[in-house]
Image (cartoon, rainbow, N blue to C red):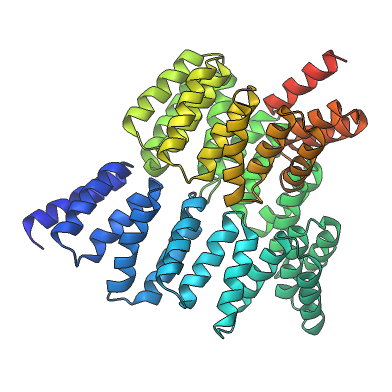
Amino acid sequence: MSTDRAVLARAAEVTAVALQPSLTLDVATRWSQLDPASVEAHRAAAKAALELFEIEQSSAHYRVVLDSSPRGTDAEFATLDSELAVSDNVHGARQLADQLALYFPGSPAALRLQAETALRADDPAAAVRSFTALAALGTAPDAETTMSLWRARILSGDVDAPLAESQARLERSPTAENRLDNALLLLAAQQNAAARAQLQTLTEDPAAAPAAQHLLGLVDFEEGRLDEAGSHFAELVVTGKFLDDAIYYLGLIAERHQDLERALRLYAQVQEGDNAVPALLRAAAILRAHGAAPAAEDLLDRLVEEVPARAPEILAARSRMYADAGEPARAATVLDQAMRQYPDSALLQYAAASLDDERGHVSAALHELEAVARRRPDDPAALNAYGYTLADHNRQLRLARSLIERAYACAPKNAAILDSYGWVLFRQGRGEDALTYLNAAYADDRGGDIAAHLGEVLWHLGRRSDADRVWSEGSRADADNPLLKATLVRLHASN
């Protein structure tokens, strides 16, 4: 490799580690122009462009990787599939896969990627179409693909046939794996009682019991059945399986019960997995709120050093900690500094807009969200954030609805977008229409924000017992949600 190419390669690596995708894209693009045959140059540019939601540019570079890699196209598709499966940018991944499927027509690997990314991006009907096209190629589906197709069909509204096929397979071959798959499909169909019955059966099988206990614990926790969830997670700790998940949720349950000392001990034991950083962020918030601010600051400092790839998330949490402690100016300072260090982070921009909104700086919040939506005009998350905030403040409701409708067209089963759609319809005086979307959102996510919105619409439609039921359920599942608390106070005080 020439000196110039080596310098650009190193620069691309450094800027990527520093979470500066704009700089990485610039450097990697120059590298690929200097060395058009370099697969790694195109790969670096493709990844950076995807982070910036520059989908066409990302696709162009990935096409070179897929066409030119000495590993072969299928191997590169497999690598890309693995990377996108763990990416938080589910909507960008889906749009990238759509473009690659057009470029590689008739490729089983491209269709499989398109189907899986559509499913993760809350468009199950599109996933069904891609899986169907894959089957039409004569490619025999493996067990994982069959399960994904059944789940996509269920989530798109075709419930009975996939469940019947799964049940028939279970009756033909009553293995633990088939029973677990059947339970997962029942959960996707929101038939939780039937799913619980299958999972309870699996708890009697020593090999399958940990997976069953894990799912039972998650379902009970989401429904606010904390004692039952705690029992399942305690069983997991004994087995040593799903250990970090179990300890994290036991910490959440202890925190909900105000046993903060126990919660801190548990959070400190979470070592790996998706919940390792959230556990320590919750521990820091507890320490800060209960008189141990220096310990909380030290924990967050160490966390940024130990997990630099999660720095924007950690800094946003630090800002939130200050805001919750009644120090909004300090919270804003943290975000200002963070956004100078990570100017491409949409997460930090959303956090800044949320803080501005809470401080009553609504115009500033909307300006920030509009800027994100302009930079990422095809990102459903950006469109939804801007549209929802407009609707929540009764501003430009026609524009708000248009933004949310565009987001909905991309991700019609996304709970947050369904919630926003219902909320803007309510703001437009269409309460009955709003219920369709809010009920769909609430069926998928019992979080406090959605419960607050659904309950308020029911309340204004005169269905006050239904509203109180939803609020009660939401309080069990998300007891500390500030929107839910504020909604209850406001509407009950006005009664």
Seen at 34% across and 33% down, the residue is 343
Residue 182 left/right relative to 323? right
User: Residue 352's spot in the image, x, y percent?
Assistant: 47, 26
From where the camera sits, is residue 220 visible?
A: yes
User: Residue 427's spot in the image, x, y percent?
Assistant: 71, 27
User: Residue 459's spot in the image, x, y percent?
Assistant: 85, 27
User: Residue 213's spot in the image, x, y percent?
Assistant: 73, 58
Depicted 254 relative to depicted 166: above or below: above
Seen at 63% across and 22% down, the residue is 393
Depicted 364 relative to depicted 105: above or below: above
Which of the 4 image quadrants contains residue 153?
bottom right
Which of the 4 image quadrants contains residue 131?
bottom right
Seen at 83% across and 13% down, the residue is 493
Q: Nearer the viewer, residue 438 or 486?
A: 438
Q: Nearer the viewer, residue 183 or 422?
A: 422
Q: Quadrant of the N terminus?
A: bottom left
Which of the 4 image quadrants contains residue 325?
top right
Q: Nearer the viewer, residue 384 or 8?
A: 384
Residue that protrudes farthest toward the left in the picture: 3
Q: Nearer the viewer, residue 482 or 108?
A: 108
Depicted 292 relative to depicted 133: above or below: above
Seen at 55% across and 64% down, the residue is 116
Q: Quadrant of the C terminus?
A: top right
Residue 103 left/right relative to 276? left
